[in-house]
Image (spheres, grey):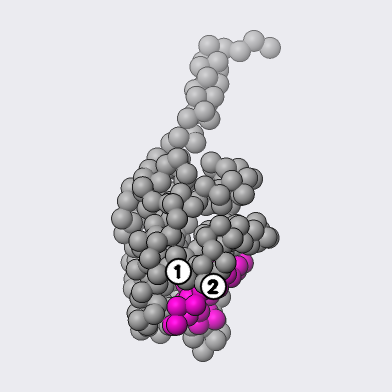
């Protein structure tokens, strides 16, 4: 059966559309700003600023879609449960067992995701990486065996997360550090443990660039850790003023 010129043109247009689709999707407009007591934090750098270690497309989708979805989830829950608008996010997570049972899952998933990602954007930056400095460097040596051992242990913990989750460094009010891995969007804040820093090992954090090579992503992530910001969080934790 022969194809008409119109059919061939139609097939060609469809093929072009399929080839172009990923680029169009990546450049699609961000969702509308969420309305409610929770909002996306403003990043201090552009999506492409962490190249080549984290690609701009991943950063854009991760921030404007995944994180935005957690914010929207909390705002939707707050429409029905006003208590969610009455306290800071870290307090809601720390007191999750005292919230109405019907809203706990939303706070665990969306609230945890919001808290985790807010921290994540803050402790990264362009022109960063290298060895830790200041009080954080001393604490890593004291509590985690030095920077090289700490990096190896941190990355190993990230690799052991089955499926989706996070690997964190927690800090107590005396400045003592500890490693902690959590599944999904669970936050150490739910255990009343402050978060110094953490890395996202959900596939959406790295799959476009690294595919299934999580180990490569973990290794390269150290190039974007902003130790000046981590030191600020460390000081805030010891002063009892660290939020999410």
User: What is the quadrant of the C terminus in the image?
Assistant: bottom left
Element under disc 2: helix
User: What is the quadrant of the N terminus in the image?
Assistant: top right
Nearer-N-terminus badge (1/2): 1
135 part of magenta stretch: no
Residue at position x 45%, y 40% in the image: 52
Q: What residue range appears in magenta?
A: 168-196
10 Å crowding of disc 1: few (<14), some (14-19), many (20+): some
Query: In this view of the protein, which residue sits in the foreground, 161 or 127?
Result: 127
- The residue that mark 2 highlights is 143
Residue 63 visible in this rendered orientation of the protein: no
Establish if 36 lies above or below 191: above
171 part of magenta stretch: yes
- The residue that mark 1 highlights is 138
Q: Position of residue 38 (x, y in %)?
A: 36, 70
Q: Position of residue 124 (x, y in %)?
A: 40, 56
**How far separated are the C-alphas under marks 1 and 2?**
9 Å
Q: Position of residue 147 (x, y in %)?
A: 52, 60
Q: Position of residue 71 (x, y in %)?
A: 42, 66
Residue 178 visible in this rendered orientation of the protein: yes
């Amino acid at each position: 059966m022969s194809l008409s010129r119109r059919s061939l043109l139609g097939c060609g247009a469809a093929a072009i559309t399929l080839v172009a689709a990923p680029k169009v999707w990546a450049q699609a407009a961000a969702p509308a700003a969420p309305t409610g007591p929770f909002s996306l934090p403003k990043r201090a750098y552009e999506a492409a600023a962490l190249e080549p270690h984290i690609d701009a497309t991943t950063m854009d989708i991760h921030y404007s879609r995944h994180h935005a979805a957690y914010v929207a989830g909390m705002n939707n829950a707050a429409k029905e449960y006003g208590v969610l608008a009455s306290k800071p996010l870290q307090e809601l997570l720390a007191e999750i067992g005292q919230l109405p049972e019907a809203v706990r899952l939303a706070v665990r998933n969306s609230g945890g995701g919001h808290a985790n990602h807010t921290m994540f954007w803050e402790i990264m930056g362009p022109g960063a990486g290298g060895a830790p400095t200041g009080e954080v460097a001393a604490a890593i040596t004291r509590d985690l065996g030095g920077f090289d051992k700490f990096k190896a242990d941190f990355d190993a913990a990230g690799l052991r997360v089955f499926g989706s989750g996070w690997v964190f460094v927690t800090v107590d009010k005396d400045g003592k550090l500890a490693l902690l891995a959590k599944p999904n969007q669970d936050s150490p804040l739910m255990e009343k443990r402050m978060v110094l820093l953490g890395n996202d090992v959900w596939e959406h954090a790295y799959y476009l660039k690294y595919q299934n090579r999580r180990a490569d992503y973990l290794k390269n992530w150290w190039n974007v850790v902003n130790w000046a910001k981590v030191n600020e969080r460390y000081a805030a934790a010891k002063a009892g003023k660290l939020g999410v």
